[in-house]
Amino acid sequence: MTEKQLSELLQDMTLTEKVEQLVQLNGDFYGGGDFLTGPAAAFHLTDNKAYRLGSILGSDGAARLTKLQDKFMKEQPHHIPALFMADVIHGYKTAFPVPIAMGAGFDPELARETAEAAAKEASAAGIHVTFSPMADLARDSRWGRCMESFGEDSFLNSCMTAATVKGFQGENCKDKGRVASCFKHFAAYGAVQSGRDYNVAELSEKTLFEDYLPSYEAAVDAGAEMAMTAFNTLDRIPCSMHKKLLRNVLRDKMGFEGVLISDYNAIGETIIHGAAEDSRDAAEKAINSGVDIDMMSDCYLDNLEELVTSGEVPESLIDEAVMRVLRLKNKLGLFEAPYKDASEEDEKRLCCCREHMELSRRAAEECIVMLKNNGILPLRAKKAAVIGSLCESRDIVGSWAIFADSSKTVTLRAALEELCPDVEFEFIPQDNPDEKALAAAKKSDAVILALGEDQLGTGESRSCTDISLPEEQKRLFEKIYGVNKNVIALLFGGRPLAIPELAEKAAAILELWLPGTAGCLAAADILSGKVSPSGRLSMSFPYCSGQLPISYSAFNTGRPKDNRVKEFIPFLSNYMDAPNIPLYPFGYGLSYTSFEYSPVALDSDTLTSDSRITASVRVKNTGDRTGKEVVQLYIRDVKGSVVRPLRELKGFKKITLSPGEEQTVSFEITEDMLRFYDINMNFTAEKGSFILYIGGDSTAESSAEFRLV
Ligand code: NOJ
């Protein structure tokens, strides 16, 4: 339809119909039998009205959604098709590694590919919009939703977010196999205080703009069709009624023109926050702030019409929101093809097809991080005990893999049996170090311990105060270590855990994350040595929970612990019981080979606003195996009108080198990369000295200096 036809359609709609387009309920409302006495009763809905709403969430399946669409189009007076939205976060039937793991892959192209595969499966299953990517920055692993974040760094997060949006939408979300992407949660949901989910976020304006907003903006720039508000407050205002944030920042400053949806009941929750009187007040505040669709609360449904007729909300506000919803339906091509790509045949053909299972395995290969290796890996043991309940668990895919086909999940046991036929394994799928477990450990050359969290231990509303290993796993480790020192710890989970005991004693540690449907095959390939690990941490691993939040991109303070200006000052910015630095820093990860870096070379040590500097290093594979290295560029702005981080990631390249091979890796430095919010909140670069570091993690030492003049 043309824009004119859409406006004509809008003009022809009654106010009731318009409001209906702005309400979204979940699929349970469309299940059948208990409809009028079940969830619908709480929403004062008749069956017919439910089928006139603009969109639903959480339903899937070509057969079901095709039927539902017929019913929606029959009931809606103008036969407007519904939008089917769902959480396709890291895959649909085929699950790919969770986003924090994808962050560790340092490979935006891979993120694009996995999103593209997820879109193919989901669109064949009738889904039009995915509530992904989550662009929230995460620096506190007490927060269970770290799992859904690409990590602690603003630049990495922006690259991964943009690539994911492009992977879902392609050039045009109307195209076959594409879905529209809804980025979330606007804004700063990852900054919830104390890592407690849904808590308040308290940030300075500079931190918000400089660290937290860029990844959302990257989603806008990548063309994301939708955005979702966050549950938290920001500046003590619930985000779903934060007019300044939603209108001035998201719409005006970032230029977002798509549909803005609330999170689940987030408009209703403004009352519980204590910032709205009742559902009428909540609806008025949310629509005024620019929230187009009310997900799963009755605020819009019960009040918007009356708010317009009483003159409190101008109808033009409703029209603006409805027009955005209609435009999205049109962009997806739903007026001409209301089922879009829904096809039972394609669904069967695509879901967990060989190509997607291979991609799931390949993605995990890139994301698994080797944190320690005393030389025990690749595995040479003839006999190995594999102990821990997670070794046979299928709950290792990810807590948002809600549609994943768990019958296809490859367990660690299955993967080891298939890919390491020369090793004699004894599997003991329990965390209890009983006699059987100890006997198996004793008679083995090495013990593989499956530790960490399963998919229910991480994710939404899975915050915790202590991120160390559960007591029973610590006990298991100590007991096993007591009888066999060759312990290889495999860590599952969606967040950095505090593992000082493993770091000290284990022979090797591999962070597998929640690796997806075929991810354990990658773990087995890494254990056997077929693949050299190449993931690098997307979030720092602290020594203990008390260090949180933590990020490499910290500030010096006036009394830095490791950089004393005056030795006589005994009062330093430190802890009495833990170091300031993390156990394993952002960007860190080992390989089976080794890399040597030349000193950093700059083609000029002076930068102007219209010139560029090329910074280069030679990287050489000095080991005897092919391996991948993530070459990382960090910059420090030595002095600013406000304090500047010690380092900021400004570029990265993942390269493959065969034994003895060398490659020159170059980065272009331009003035816009040095911009920040200055003392007057202007986004600008200030003249002066900069230090540039290039290396294999955020502690890289090879540096060079330049000046911006
Ligand atoms: C709540 C979550 O916060 C959000 O990420 C998700 O997309 C919605 N529920 C819909 O399931």
Image (spheres, grey):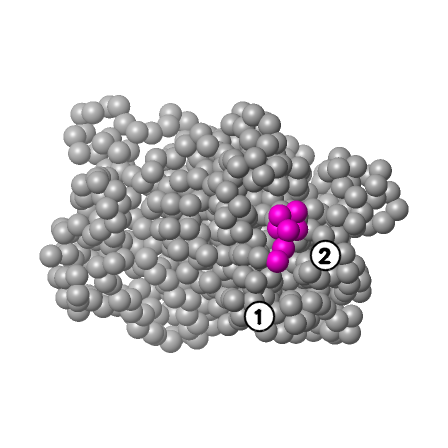
Identify the amino acid type marked 2: Gln
* Mark 1 or mark 2: whose residue is earlier in sequence: 1
Vertical placement of 523 versus 290: above or below? below
Q: Quadrant of the C terminus?
A: bottom left
Q: Which residues are magenta?
A: 12-18
Vertical placement of 147 versus 560: above or below? below
- Residue 677 x/y as whole percent: 26, 45
Give whichever of 362, 275 is nearer the camera. 275
Give whichever of 470, 218 is nearer the camera. 218
Disc 1 target residue: 1
Magenta stretch prevailing secondary structure: helix
Asked whether residue 440 is in view, the answer is no
On screen, residue 329 versus residue 419, left or right, reads left
Residue found at the very far left of the displayed protein = 709
Q: Residue at x 53, y 37 (%)?
A: 311
**Number of numbered discs present?**
2
Q: Residue at x 51, y 52 (%)?
A: 320
Magenta span contains residue 169: no
**Residue 10, picture quadrant:** bottom right
- Alpha carbon distance from label 1 to label 2: 18 Å
Give whichever of 365, 399 is nearer the camera. 399
Q: Secondary structure at mark 1?
A: loop
Asked whether residue 257 is in view, the answer is yes
Say the numbered circle drawn on residue 76: 2
